[in-house]
């Protein structure tokens, strides 16, 4: 997993350094400044750092996370967004040596603020709510449930053209859920990732 973290950090460094190394012509810079449309679609891969301590002990300190996000502008700098992502884990229960499986999905909605720093470099800040569902299987039993909690995130993006951009961001999405036997679970966690986006 440390190798995955290193790759994400290296990708973030490369994307951030692109504006420093690129020298677009004046015409290209002007083209990049003009948005192609009001809607965006972003597909990203990330590492999720689980909020629940017992989950981390059983499934690991971080899990691969995949997400699809859509957005719609409501003004020059403000937009609404929705996202759905998921992660899973497989581990072994100590002492009994039994396999355990877990799956969590995160459905989020919210609003965001976009700031253009240069013709090709931008930043975003987002807030919203998440519904986090889970399904755990272990010892021949299956437990499922969900919780609702806050979500917030910041990100930076590099704009290749009027329609294509890449984004690196850090999000926090967390909720809690109580099982039938009174066990409180912490769902979600910190999300560090990068993705490719389209504007149309």
Image (tube, rainbow, N blue to C red):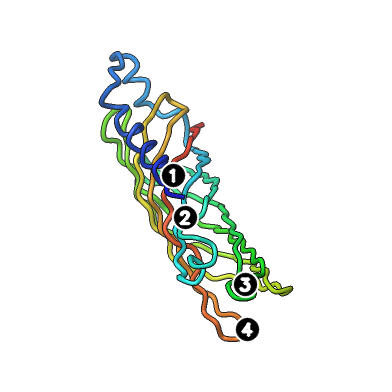
Instruction: Look at the numbered discs 4 and 1 and tell me whether their residues touch, using CB distance below 8 Å.
Output: no
Q: CA distance from mark 4 to mark 3?
A: 10 Å
Q: Name the residue located 52 percent from the left edge and 39 percent from the top edge.
A: 41
Instruction: Look at the numbered discs 3 and 2 and tell me whether their residues touch, using CB distance below 8 Å.
Output: no
Instruction: Look at the numbered discs 3 and 1 and tell me whether their residues touch, using CB distance below 8 Å.
Output: no
Whichever of labels 3 and 2 marks the residue nearer the N terminus, that label is: 2
Q: Name the residue located 53 percent from the left edge and 40 percent from the top edge.
A: 43
Q: Which residue is mark 3?
A: 145
| Crowding at mark 2 (Cα within 10 Å: few <14, some 14-19, many 20+) | many
Is 107 rendered above or below residue 148? above
Residue 102's quadrant in the figure?
bottom right
Whichever of labels 1 and 2 marks the residue nearer the N terminus, that label is: 1
Q: Is residue 131 left or right of residue 120?
A: right
Q: CA distance from mark 3 to mark 2?
A: 19 Å
Q: Name the residue located 39 percent from the left edge and 43 percent from the top edge.
A: 6
The residue closer to the viewer here, 137 or 84, is 137
> Helix or strand or loop: what does disc 4 sit on?
loop
Residue 131's quadrant in the figure?
bottom right
Q: CA distance from mark 4 to mark 1?
A: 38 Å
> Helix or strand or loop: what does disc 1 sit on?
helix
> Helix or strand or loop: what does disc 2 sit on?
strand
Q: Which label sits in the foreground, 4 or 1?
A: 1
Whichever of labels 4 and 1 marks the residue nearer the N terminus, that label is: 1
Q: Which label sits in the foreground, 1 or 2?
A: 1
Q: Which residue is mark 2?
A: 48
Whichever of labels 3 and 1 marks the residue nearer the N terminus, that label is: 1
Q: Which residue is mark 4?
A: 180
Whichever of labels 4 and 3 marks the residue nearer the N terminus, that label is: 3
**Residue 7: x and y, percent?**
42, 40
| Crowding at mark 1 (Cα within 10 Å: few <14, some 14-19, many 20+) | few
Q: CA distance from mark 1 to mark 2?
A: 14 Å
| Crowding at mark 3 (Cα within 10 Å: few <14, some 14-19, many 20+) | some
């Amino acid at each position: 997993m440390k190798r995955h973290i290193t790759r994400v950090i290296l990708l973030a460094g490369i994307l951030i350094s692109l504006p420093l190394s690129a020298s677009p012509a004046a015409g290209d810079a002007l083209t990049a400044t003009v948005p192609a449309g009001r809607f965006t679609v972003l597909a990203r891969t990330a590492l999720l750092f689980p909020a629940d301590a017992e989950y981390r002990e059983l499934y690991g300190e971080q899990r691969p996370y995949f997400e699809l996000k859509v957005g719609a502008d409501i003004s020059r700098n403000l937009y609404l967004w929705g996202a759905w992502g998921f992660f899973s884990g497989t581990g072994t229960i100590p002492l009994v040596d039994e396999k355990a499986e877990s799956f969590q999905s995160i459905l989020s909605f919210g609003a965001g603020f976009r700031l253009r720093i240069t013709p090709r470099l931008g930043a975003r800040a987002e807030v919203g709510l998440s519904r986090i569902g889970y399904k755990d299987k272990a010892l021949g039993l299956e437990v499922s449930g969900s919780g609702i909690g806050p979500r917030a995130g910041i990100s930076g993006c590099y704009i290749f053209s009027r329609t294509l951009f890449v984004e690196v961001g850090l999000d926090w999405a967390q909720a809690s859920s109580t099982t039938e036997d009174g066990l409180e679970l912490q769902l979600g966690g910190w999300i560090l990732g990068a993705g490719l986006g389209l504007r149309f």
